[in-house]
Every structure is written in structure tokens, then in C-alpha cells.
Amino acid sequence: MKYDSIMIHYGELSTKGANRRLFIQQLLHNVRSALKPMGLTATGGRDHIYVQVNELDSIDSVIARLQEVSGIQRLTPVMKVEKEIEQINQGSLALLLDSKAKTFKVETKRADKTFPLDSYGTSREVGGFLLGHIRGIEVDVHNPEQVLRVNIREDACYLSLQDYPGLGGYPLGMNGRVLMLLSGGIDSPVAAYMLMRRGIEVDCLHFASPPYTSEAVLDKLKDLLKVLNAYQSDIKLSVVPFTKLQEEIYRNVPEPYCITIMRRMMVRIAVGVAKKTKCLAIATGESIGQVASQTLESVQVINEVTSFPILRPLAVSDKVSIIDDAKRIGTYDISIRPFEDCCTIFKPRKPKTKPRSDECEFYEAKFDWAPLVETCIENLTHIYLSEGEELIR
Ligand code: ATP
Ligand code: MG
């Protein structure tokens, strides 16, 4: 391996002028934590973070790990040489020989204007040297097998052949913390991932209704969160004992309204938990039109119970693209394991697709739900997932 470091290009940094320092500090911190188990370190600067690698590291596994860190736009394995044409030539030769390409072109970027050759002159010089030292190789400016990039910066010259895409977005921890309502389905883990990618830290809340729902759901949720640990190394999952309240709903509310009222109760509880734990919003995996409880009319009457923000990252995503995302991040196979959700168990035969708020209020007035909501908020159990393992506390 000829590379000595990986150059990290910042994500959406250019649009965040005032937050630049915070962005870089947070990203550097996250990169260092992600690479710590590999025994690697990173240094940060105004324009890039560099991860030092050595002969023994497998570049591929380092890149793969960095591709899970949000806030990174692009990753480039680089060879660092001094700003001397002889060194640039020799380094380029080593890289190109290694690549076994038959055609190539050289592209030079010169940030350091004191370097004696201009960009065009450098590309010509290096290209000429390579042609003279690799048997049978040719220049192809239109469709080369390899582009050799010569990046002349203030501190040194960086040579590279290939870029890898990063996750984009913002570094995790930069945009506050949100309470995600996690069922066991396909949508909510994808929604959680999308929040993490935007730099939002995620706590999770699950509504369990034993004995109607089984303990096995928890194993499924833990497995989902272990996958999401790649993007957020520590995740808290709180479980709401929802049985009593749910039974009361079904005793007092006509069947078509049960789901809507249940959702309103879920929101009340989630907002209570979010305020207690200093989360700035709650979030769901709802997608408009997907099922009866996710029409805009339903969303409206569900939202009415609070002025607290409710994020719906998948609001306008279609199911096919949600499934693609779930497969890509690795939650899909876990999500499709059969399970009993508290929503599916009490599923009404004909749910109301256009519920009315006066009717909701009418049915809610029939029973004393407020103390039950309070009890739910006060009796959570907590599970902690850290770097793919459950922490026993
Ligand atoms: P998902 O795949 O996320 O389960 P879904 O299509 O099954 O979504 P619903 O069951 O209608 O949709 O739930 C919509 C959203 O409500 C979920 O994405 C989740 O955020 C929340 N939710 C539903 N059930 C629960 C639960 N038992 N605990 C926590 N949140 C839930
Ligand atoms: Mg569900």
C-alpha cells in the first residue's frame, strides 16, 4: 500500500459559516471515536481532516468505517510528498504502477501559488515523467482508466487516484437531540438513521403492551439499534408500559377511532418524556398516505394535542425508497422478522381515515386518561446500546 493518510472532505460546511469551528471540532471528535478501536488517530485543519494510516492497515476497512460517520462529503486516500517535482514524480510513479492502469491523465490543483510550476505545467511534467517510466502506458484525456491527482497545498503535496463518497450531512451531536418513536417496523429505523445523518442525536421510545405484545419485540429493537450504533455509538431506548392505557382506550372509544386516540396518547406521553429528558422534538416514521392513520387529516388531529415539534423525516418518501434505504443500512432483514406491535394487535377493522378533532375530544372526555399518561411517563424502563452491545446498568 502506497498511501499514508486519508483526506476527509467536510460535508455541508460551506453553508454553515459561523458554525465552522464547531463543525470541525465535532467531526474530528466523531472520527477519532470511530477509529479508536482500530488504533488510528486523526488531525484536523481548516480544510480537511487527515487520518494517518500505515502499511498494515487495510485502507478498505478504514474507509468503510468512515463512510458511516455523518458530516463527511468525500474521502480520498493520499500519499503525502514534499513540494519538490522529483518527489512528486516518484510518488506518482509508485501510485500509477500499483494501479496497473493502461491509460491515465494527470490533474493538478495548486493552492500554493509559490510552487514554481503552474497547474498545467505540473501536469505536463508529471505526465511526461510517467510516460517515460512505465512501459506501454498512454495518456487519454477523455476517458482515462486512472486520473492521477496532484494537489499542491500550503503544507505539502498530496497525490491520489480515487475518491470515495461519504455520508454527507452534519457531524452527529451538532443539531441537538430528538426522541424517536421506534416501533419494530421498516420505517422508524430508517427515520432514525436520517436524523442521525443530519447531525441529530437520537433517543428512542417504544410502546409495549404485554401480554398482547411479546418480549421478543425488545430483542428485535435491540438488534435494530445495534445496526444504528454504526452511526451513533450510544443509543438509549426507553420502553413505555402502555397496556393499561391501551385497554382503557379500547374499552371507551368506538373501534374506528381507537388508532387515532391511541396516537394522540402516544404523542402526549412522548412529549412528556422528551421534555423530561431535554429532547428538542419528537419524531416518527410516518409517511403520508401509507396507512389509515397517516392521512393528512389524521396527522392534523394527532398534532393537535401538542405544540411541541414533531418531525416526520419520511413524510413524503415512498415505500420503495424507504425499503431500499433499510436494505442499504442493514435494518431491513431485522425489521421484517414477524412481531406483534401494539398497533397491529388492536387494529380496528375499519379505521377512520378522516378523523375529526371534536369527536376525538368527545371520546377522550369519557375516561380519565391524564393520570394513566402520567403513569406511563414515570414508569419507563431503559435499555442502553453502545457500540453494538447492550450495556447492563
Ligand atoms: P414502522 O415501519 O415504523 O412500524 P408503520 O408503517 O408500521 O411504520 P405505523 O405502525 O402506523 O407505521 O406507525 C407509524 C409510526 O408510529 C412509526 O413509524 C413509529 O414512529 C410510531 N409507532 C408505531 N407503533 C409504535 C410503538 N409500538 N412504539 C413506538 N413507536 C411506534
Ligand atoms: Mg409499525
Image (cartoon, rainbow, N blue to C red):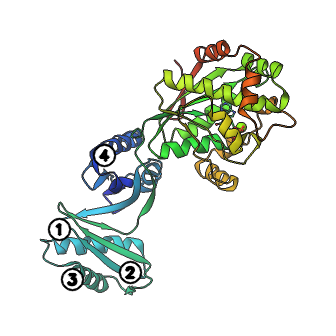
Looking at the image, which is closer to me, 177 or 305?
A: 305
Cα distance between the residues tagged 1 and 4:
26 Å
Of marks 1 and 3, which one's residue comes earlier in the chain? Answer: 1
Look at discs 1 and 3 and give the one toward the viewer.
Answer: 1
Query: Residue 104, labelled with which disc?
Result: 2
Of marks 3 and 4, which one's residue comes earlier in the chain? Answer: 4
In the rendered structure, which amino acid carries the disc numbered 1?
A: Asp
Residue carrying label 3: 121
Q: Position of residue 243 (x, y in %)?
A: 74, 19
Q: Is mark 2 on a helix, strand or loop?
A: strand
Q: Position of residue 246 (x, y in %)?
A: 75, 21
Residue carrying label 4: 19
Q: Residues within 10 Å of mark 4 (few under 14, many from 20)?
A: few
Q: Does the residue labelled 1 lie within 8 Å of ligand 1?
A: no
Say whether marks 1 and 3 touch (CB < 8 Å): no
Q: Is mark 4 on a helix, strand or loop?
A: helix
Of marks 1 and 2, which one's residue comes earlier in the chain? Answer: 2
The image quadrant where one finds ligand 1 is top right
Q: Where is residue 167 in the image (x, y as percent from the top left)?
A: 47, 53
